[in-house]
């Protein structure tokens, strides 16, 4: 009889040398291993449960007996613990309610349509916000000592001592009093800073209004001139932003209503439109303009049909016609030049333009650098974004008052080419959106109020504010570090001359000022561009 090591059920073999047999053996071993592992885990759990039970028995039994109703100390401890827990729950609930109210009033401030609504929401937010430690934001001791010194000089009544004291240490950012954290989103500045400003204002009026023979008129004028020069001046800068530049109307309107508009106003692209309106009107004209006139302004006409656009692109390299903008600006500025606008209103207007030529630097046009340029031509040049409008030629008034080209066409040499070339200018925001350096050099400006509406910058600044508000001081420093790194890399691209230099110029510029008003960044506004 033939005996084999494999049992078989015809026609399948299930012995240890077959795949089926090995699979069955592996499954049996696996199940046995899992069973042993489960048994060991159960034993470990039972061991530790018994250990915990022993600890609980050793410690809880005396505690339970200690909390017996006949034990007054135990009852007192239990009542104290319950009261502590209730207080903690109440504090958490109150903090949650305060946080909800603060969030509500912040949203009301963002949604406010008038300054009165914003002021009411800011006042309520101050009531709901715990008093912050302001000593870490500015030098309170220095400010307090300076106030006492000024008051002591005023009580003595000597005008020369007052002048000496004010000329010695009258600076804009005394003790870091211009820190943005002291005024951003707040209805009032700290009390010490307000007292210092009021005291300085009072003493300046004393010097101006005094009829004493102690000071001559020439000495007063010299003191005021030197003090203003040392203290510095404030300028309002309006950025570009295409159709989002309507945001600047609200900013300027609020400053006019509260008579806080600086005498120096500068802008680029669509911001220059608002600057030209402000710099060519007196206070009564400005107030009446913002009451009703500005609502009916239409700076751009329809683009036209597809064939019209195609013809314009092929012949002029631009999608839009700029004549409507020129006509509206002529009507608003009355063909005034920079010098004429300054003589009429006393306001200094600056408009930035840049050249399509590679080696020609951008310019900030004003009554010192280009007094005879007519304002409407500077604004149209500053609004001439490449591809949207064709580059524009600057126009000026000659001695007889006729409007002529500011840069007469020059002739090429016979060995180079034939014909003439016209110097044209385009959108200033491409290279110098906020002309801070030029205003510092020409007009001694050291404090800038910036209205930022650029669609590629406003979301970044909003994100920076969000990080500062919810991430704390360290997160705010990291955000500032990232911003500096981006600008540094963009400057490196410009230095090396990479093809992306035009895009790098947009992000390598200054975005913010000492006070920055940022347009809310939403998807609807991006679509409006």
Image (cartoon, grey):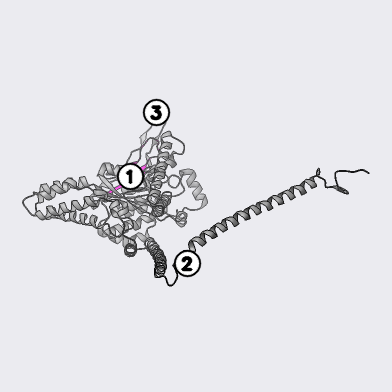
Q: Which residue is mark 2?
A: 64
Note whether residue 340 is visible. Answer: no
Q: Give the image location of residue 219, x and y in percent.
A: 11, 47
Residues in magenta, as a range: 348-364
Identify the element where label 2 is drawn. Answer: helix
Q: Which residue is mark 1?
A: 435
First in sequence: mark 2 vs mark 3: 2
Quadrant for the N terminus in the image: top right
Quarter assignment of residue 494: top left
Q: CA distance from mark 2 to mark 1?
A: 77 Å
Question: Could you say where residue 165 lies in the image, as x and y percent from the top left?
Answer: 14, 48
Tell me the residue that label 3 is attached to.
414
Label 3 environment density (alpha carbons within 10 Å; few <14, some 14–19, many ≥20) = few
Residue in the picture at 43% in, 37% down: 493
Q: Is residue 361 visible?
A: yes
Q: Nearer the viewer, residue 422 or 483?
A: 483
Left or right, 448 with reference to 456: left
Q: Is residue 201 above or below residue 19?
A: below
Question: Callout 1: helix, strand or loop?
Answer: loop
Q: Is residue 462 left or right of residue 161?
A: right
- Image point 34% across, 45% down: which residue? 352
Residue 106 in percent (x, y) is at 38, 61
Question: Which residue extends farthest left?
Answer: 213
């Amino acid at each position: 009889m033939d005996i084999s090591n494999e049992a078989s059920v015809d026609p399948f073999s299930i012995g240890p040398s077959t795949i089926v047999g090995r699979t069955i053996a592996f499954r049996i071993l696996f199940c046995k291993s899992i069973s042993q592992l489960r048994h060991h885990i159960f034993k470990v759990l039972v061991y530790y449960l018994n250990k915990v039970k022993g600890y609980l028995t050793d410690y809880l039994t005396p505690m339970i007996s200690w909390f017996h109703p006949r034990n007054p100390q135990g009852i007192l401890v239990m009542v104290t613990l319950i009261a502590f827990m209730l207080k903690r729950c109440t504090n958490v609930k109150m903090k949650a309610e305060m946080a909800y109210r603060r969030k509500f009033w912040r949203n009301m401030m963002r949604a406010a349509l008038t300054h009165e609504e914003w002021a009411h929401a800011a006042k309520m937010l101050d009531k709901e916000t715990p008093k912050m430690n302001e000593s870490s934001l500015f030098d309170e001791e220095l400010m307090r000592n300076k106030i006492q010194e000024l008051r002591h000089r005023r009580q003595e009544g000597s005008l020369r001592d007052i002048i000496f004291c004010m000329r010695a240490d009258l600076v804009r950012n005394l003790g870091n009093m211009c820190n943005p954290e002291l005024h951003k989103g707040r209805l009032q500045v700290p009390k010490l800073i307000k007292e210092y400003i009021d005291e300085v204002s009072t003493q300046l009026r004393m010097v101006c209004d005094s009829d004493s023979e102690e000071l001559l008129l020439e000495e007063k004028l010299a003191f005021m001139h030197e003090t203003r020069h040392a203290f510095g001046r404030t300028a309002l800068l309006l950025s570009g932003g295409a159709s989002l530049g309507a945001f600047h109307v609200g900013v300027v309107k609020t400053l006019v209503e509260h008579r806080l508009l600086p005498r120096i106003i500068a802008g680029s692209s669509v911001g220059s439109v608002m600057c030209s309106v402000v710099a060519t009107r007196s206070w009564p004209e400005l107030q009446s303009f913002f009451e009703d006139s500005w609502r009916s302004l239409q700076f751009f006409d329809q683009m036209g049909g597809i064939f019209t656009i195609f013809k314009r692109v092929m012949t002029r390299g631009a999608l839009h016609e700029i004549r409507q903008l020129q006509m509206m600006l002529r009507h608003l500025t009355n063909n005034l030049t920079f010098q004429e606008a300054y003589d009429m209103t006393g306001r200094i207007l600056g408009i930035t333009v840049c050249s399509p030529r590679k080696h020609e630097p951008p310019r900030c046009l004003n009554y010192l650098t280009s007094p005879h340029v007519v304002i409407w031509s500077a604004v149209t040049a500053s609004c001439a974004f490449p591809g949207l409008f064709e580059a524009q030629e600057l126009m000026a008034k000659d001695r007889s008052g006729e409007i002529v080209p500011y840069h007469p066409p020059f002739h090429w040499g016979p060995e180079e080419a034939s014909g003439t070339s016209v110097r044209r200018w385009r959108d200033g925001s491409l290279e110098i959106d906020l002309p801070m350096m030029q205003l510092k050099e020409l007009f001694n400006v050291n404090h800038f109020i910036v209205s930022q509406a650029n669609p590629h910058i406003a979301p970044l600044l909003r994100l920076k504010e969000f990080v500062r508000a919810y991430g704390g001081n360290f997160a705010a420093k990291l955000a500032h570090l990232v911003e500096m790194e981006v600008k540094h890399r963009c400057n490196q691209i410009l230095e090396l001359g990479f093809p992306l230099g035009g895009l790098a110029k947009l992000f390598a510029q200054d975005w913010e000022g000492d006070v920055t008003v940022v347009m809310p960044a939403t998807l609807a506004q991006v679509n409006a561009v």
